[in-house]
Amino acid sequence: MTRPLPPAPRPAGGHGRPRDLPSGGAVPPGPGPSPARASAPVTTLAAERAADPSAAVRTPGEQAASRAAGAARESVGLVGAGRAGSAVALALASVGHPVVAVVTRSEVARARAAGRFPAARIGSLERVADGLRAADLLLVAVPDDAIAPTVQRLAALGALRAGQALAHLSGRHGLRALTAGVEPGAARIAMHPIMTLPGDRDDPGVFAGVPFGVTADPGAAALARRLVTGIGGTLVEVADDRRELYHAAVVLGGNFLASLTLAAREALAAAGLPEPAVALGPLLRASLDNALAGGWPAATGPIRRADVGTVLAHRRALAEVDPALAEVYRALASFTTDELARANLLGEAAAGRLRTALENRPSPGPSSPGP
Ligand SMILES: NC(=O)c1ccc[n+]([C@@H]2O[C@H](COP(=O)([O-])OP(=O)(O)OC[C@H]3O[C@@H](n4cnc5c(N)ncnc54)[C@H](OP(=O)(O)O)[C@@H]3O)[C@@H](O)[C@H]2O)c1
């Protein structure tokens, strides 16, 4: 069972380890602020960077110095050093969480991980099981479908122990994916960065201002908050049984916004524009801002105006380039019609005309080559 996450804790510096957590979820007083940070009561990396732009990016040497100065935080074992796992582990390392073990499968991934986490034991699950067992926090950053089987393997290899925190980065999964073989006393955390992480650069400040969709066992809620805010993120609490819907919504808005943008780019290129991205940029940014701030009342375009002739012309033109694109347009136009009508922003008669135009197959138009 999950409970609401507690309010933000006191400034960084209390570093109670997971095994120290009482079952009620409160974080016991830590050893106090480190000398390095005692004079900087900072709760987020974003604030820290604002105060000192160089503070967020720490070299391994600086991290070691910081730890030596007493700022050591929960050690991390990373299972799956791909795009998201590497980004989160790098960010955690930059704020004082030593990365002690990394599981990779390929030679290429191993070499990459060695560059990123020079102090970690790196290798297959079997080879680094001991190192993982010693870690305070295990970050299972494998593809969604592999999380539960990977946790089962971790348990079978003895890499899990009581008092550890076990986390994944998936949006879809809640805590159940982490349950297999978890020792009594281990705490589960689902912490999904609501951000696209293409893995093309190593930037420990990448999570500044990024919301994380978090579900946590009561005993791990304070730790989850500290991990997320420690790397500059913000917390969005997600109920364990709503994560599939939560993730579907995030994919709809994030991943498919990218798909739609690419579709628009390709159609503009087919229309002969030399630089489609340049032509689209201002419109897309303004539309996104308007939709986020204004909702449906901010919508413009041919559906809002009930320009049936224009909608029919668009369907014809797109069908000539790519029938799949025309089908996407039809589905979105239909959805937009229904939503605008429901919000009383489109009259029933106009909505009816649009629906009829969207149900029929587009007839060949003037731009079609004749027989
Ligand atoms: N990338 C994003 O934008 C993003 C954003 C938010 C959340 N996430 C979440 O982060 C998690 C990881 O996604 P990702 O994008 O980082 O994936 P990724 O780049 O493909 O990395 C996955 C890692 O898991 C390992 N792996 C792949 N299949 C495996 C299996 N069957 N068993 C064990 N290990 C396996 C790979 O290891 P080797 O390289 O050693 O083969 C790789 O290091 C997912 O839960 C995803 O939902 C991703």
Image (cartoon, grey):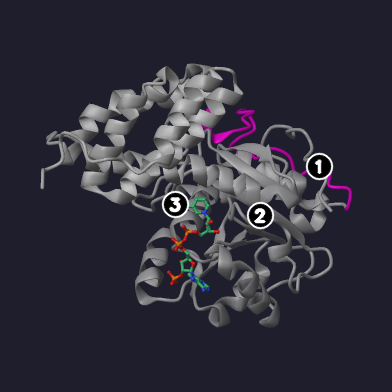
Q: Indicate whether residue 30 is drawn in magenta.
A: yes
Identify which amino acid the numbered label 1 is placed on.
Answer: Pro
Disc 3 target residue: 61
Within-10-Å neighbours for mark 2: few <14, some 14–19, many 20+: many
Of labels 2 and 1, earlier in sequence is 1
Q: Gap between marks 2 and 3, in whole Å? A: 18 Å
Residue name at image x 54 percent, y 17 percent? 345
Closer to us: 334 or 184: 334
Within-10-Å neighbours for mark 3: few <14, some 14–19, many 20+: few
Q: Secondary structure at mark 2?
A: loop
Cβ at disc 3 under 8 Å from ligand 1: no
Of labels 2 and 3, earlier in sequence is 3
Q: Is residue 89 left or right of residue 19?
A: left
- State which region is magenta: 23-48
Q: Which mark is residue 74?
A: 2
Q: Secondary structure at mark 3?
A: helix
What x and y, as percent, mark residue 125? 55, 78
Cβ at disc 2 under 8 Å from ligand 1: no
Is residue 73 something one can see in this rendering?
A: no
What x and y, as percent, mark residue 224? 69, 47
Within-10-Å neighbours for mark 1: few <14, some 14–19, many 20+: few
| Image vertical order of residue 108 relative to residue 356, above or below | below
Residue name at image x 48 percent, y 21 percent? 350
Q: Which mark is residue 80?
A: none
Q: Gap between marks 2 and 1, in whole Å? A: 15 Å
Q: Nearer the observer, disc 1 or disc 3? A: 1
What x and y, as percent, mark residue 134? 67, 69
Identify which amino acid the numbered label 3 is placed on.
Answer: Gly
Disc 1 target residue: 29
Identify which amino acid the numbered label 2 is placed on.
Answer: Glu
Residue name at image x 37 percent, y 23 percent? 302
